């Protein structure tokens, strides 16, 4: 098998790294090396930023109307659809996500994300005239929304294509140019999409620099030619990015970790909860920031719900992510799998009860992958590391509560605030309860209810700013007020000029 070399994509062309160095990219399901990706340097970042800055000044891009940008974005859809099979395959072999999720959810959300942003910018008020005010004198004021400039997009490895598109589309819709740094673990689909989409764009509008976070990511977040960082990843790295960005006061959007709490009320339908809560925690084998990882269950239904959860979890197929029957694929790499098992061990040491799972599974044909059985831990409490920290694996921690006040207190006792949820028979009472939960998204009787026109982001240490919809577009825009004076005669500007010019 020929191992492909993945270079940078700068100014409309593939560019080899200045260092001449490459590193291996592995298939998480098998451990096989499937590509060699460029090890970018600060000099490579300089080249990409310079190309992106030139593209900002290219009249073809700079003067393109929102209507034309909308039409251009819509053309992305055809490209994605025509290449859907290749993109889905590359995404599975590089990220370990299951083909059924990527084909049924990710690709559709990508198309939907483009469609809704293309629609939005057809009517979004990029220019607004304000009514004249009589004092201090009549002026005409226009408020215009302009691109920030060159934006750095830094996504995580867990949903590489979807995260990339969710950043790229609003950035371009707002008229910016971008430099993308894919995760070094999953660069394939970002590079491939850049190559496929770039012919629709002037050169330099979309650039990709591959490499590791501490080199390429750092260079981007410190670069004075960059006006905005849009980052998805861990809270630890998010804090570092905010510190770096502060040196030149860049705009920053941070989509970080989560520890989603779901409250199950006494009147909830146990069958529905068992299916829904496991969907909430097991999608992408638990490697999703918005997962519902803490299930807070009313004491009256605690034991019957545990039995249902174990029964449903036992039916799920762990296996090759390329097999459409597979529900649970591999951890992204072995070290991450060991970390997940470490959290399970620590919870058991701290008094948790193992309801099911808790172990590594060897999958025939995928012996080099690190698979973990869906794991349910009961008798958990908020002092356990497995309950406080993000595990990012197929692990549900179950906590018993007595009354609503206690459930709210447990749910909110977290550094994170990305997602929360309520499983209940009383959706009216749930509306009030939802207002008490400290999270950017609250889902009632479902999970992962992501809509491309609905703002998504975190409270507390789960992030800053919002992606998707109007909030997502506006996070890539600057605001300018252009004021024009009507009064041309200085002698008549008594309230303003008169303060300085004290003529007789
Ligand atoms: P990570 O923070 O290790 O890496 C994310 C990206 O940042 C990668 O591209 C990495 O190369 C880069 N990076 C690393 N160090 C950097 C630095 N010093 N400067 C700039 N960039 C740097 O996260 P990960 O392991 O790739 O992803 C998992 C994390 O992402 C989890 O915490 C998960 O919750 C979070 N996540 C959040 C969302 C969300 O929308 N809130 C979505 C997906 C994942």
Image (tube, rainbow, N blue to C red):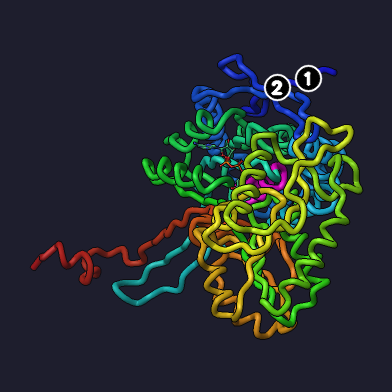
Q: Is mark 2 within 8 Å of ligand 1?
A: no
For residue 80, above or below residue 412: above
Provide residue 475's location: percent of width, then percent of height.
53, 55
Q: Which residues are magenta?
A: 160-172
The front one of 391 and 2 is 391
The secondary structure making up most of the magenta span is helix
Q: Left or right: 281 with respect to 124?
A: right
The front one of 491 and 382 is 382
The front one of 21 and 249 is 21
Q: Left or right: 455 with respect to 191?
A: left
Q: Quadrant of the C terminus?
A: bottom left
**Would residue 68 be seen by someone viewing this image from the given angle?**
no
Q: Which residue is mark 2?
A: 36
Labels 1 & 2 near each other (Cβ < 8 A): yes
Q: Residue furthest left?
A: 504
Q: Residues within 10 Å of mark 1 (few under 14, many from 20)?
A: few
The front one of 486 and 335 is 335
Q: Which residue is mark 1?
A: 3
Image disc number at residue 121 = none
For residue 272, above or below residue 227: below
Name which residue lies at 39% across and 61% down: 483
Provide residue 272's location: percent of width, then percent of height.
81, 71
Name which residue lies at 52% across and 57% down: 465
For residue 293, above or below residue 435: above
The kind of secondary structure element at disc 1 is loop
């Amino acid at each position: 098998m020929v191992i492909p070399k993945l270079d940078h994509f700068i100014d409309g062309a593939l560019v080899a790294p200045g260092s001449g160095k490459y590193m291996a990219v592995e298939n998480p399901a098998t451990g096989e090396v499937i590509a060699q990706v460029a090890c970018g340097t600060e000099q490579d970042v300089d080249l990409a930023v310079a190309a992106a800055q030139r593209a900002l000044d290219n009249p073809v891009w700079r003067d393109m109307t929102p209507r034309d940008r909308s039409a251009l974005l819509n053309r992305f859809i055809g490209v994605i659809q025509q290449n859907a099979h290749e993109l889905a395959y590359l995404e599975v072999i590089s990220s370990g996500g299951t083909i059924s999720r990527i084909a049924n959810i990710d690709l559709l959300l990508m198309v939907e994300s483009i469609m809704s942003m293309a629609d939005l910018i057809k009517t979004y008020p990029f220019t607004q005239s304000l009514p004249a005010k009589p004092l201090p004198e009549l002026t005409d004021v226009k408020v215009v929304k302009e691109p920030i400039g060159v934006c750095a997009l830094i996504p995580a490895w867990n949903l590489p294509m979807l995260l990339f598109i969710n950043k790229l589309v609003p950035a371009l819709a707002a008229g910016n140019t971008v430099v993308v740094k894919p995760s070094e673990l999953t660069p394939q689909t970002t590079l491939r999409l850049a190559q496929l989409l770039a012919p629709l764009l002037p050169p330099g509008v979309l650039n990709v620099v591959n490499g590791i976070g501490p080199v390429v990511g750092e260079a981007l977040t410190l670069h004075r030619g960059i006006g905005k960082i849009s980052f998805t990843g861990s809270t630890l790295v998010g804090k570092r990015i905010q510190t770096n960005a502060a040196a030149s006061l860049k705009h920053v959007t941070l989509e970080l970790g989560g520890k989603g709490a779901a409250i199950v009320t006494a009147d909830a339908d146990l069958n529905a909860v068992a299916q829904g809560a496991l969907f909430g925690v097991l999608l992408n084998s638990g490697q999703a920031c918005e997962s519902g990882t803490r299930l807070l269950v009313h004491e009256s239904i605690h034991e019957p719900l545990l039995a249902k959860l174990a029964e449903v979890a036992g039916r799920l197929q762990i296996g090759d992510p390329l097999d459409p029957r597979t529900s649970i694929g591999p951890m992204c790499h072995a070290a991450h799998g060991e970390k997940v098992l470490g959290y399970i061990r620590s919870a058991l040491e701290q008094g948790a009860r193992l309801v099911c799972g808790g172990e590594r599974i060897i999958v025939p044909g995928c012996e080099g992958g690190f698979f973990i059985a869906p794991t349910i831990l009961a008798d958990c409490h908020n002092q356990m590391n497995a309950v406080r920290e993000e595990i990012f694996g197929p692990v549900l921690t179950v906590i018993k509560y007595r009354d609503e006040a206690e459930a709210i207190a447990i749910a909110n006792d977290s550094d994170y605030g990305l997602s929360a949820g309520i499983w209940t028979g009383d959706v009216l009472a749930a509306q009030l309860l939802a207002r008490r939960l400290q999270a950017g998204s609250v889902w009632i009787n479902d999970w992962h209810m992501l809509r491309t026109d609905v703002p998504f982001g975190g409270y507390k240490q789960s992030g800053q700013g919002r992606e998707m919809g109007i909030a997502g577009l506006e996070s890539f825009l600057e605001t300018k007020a252009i004021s024009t004076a009507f009064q041309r005669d200085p002698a008549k500007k008594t309230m303003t000029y008169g303060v300085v010019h004290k003529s007789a």
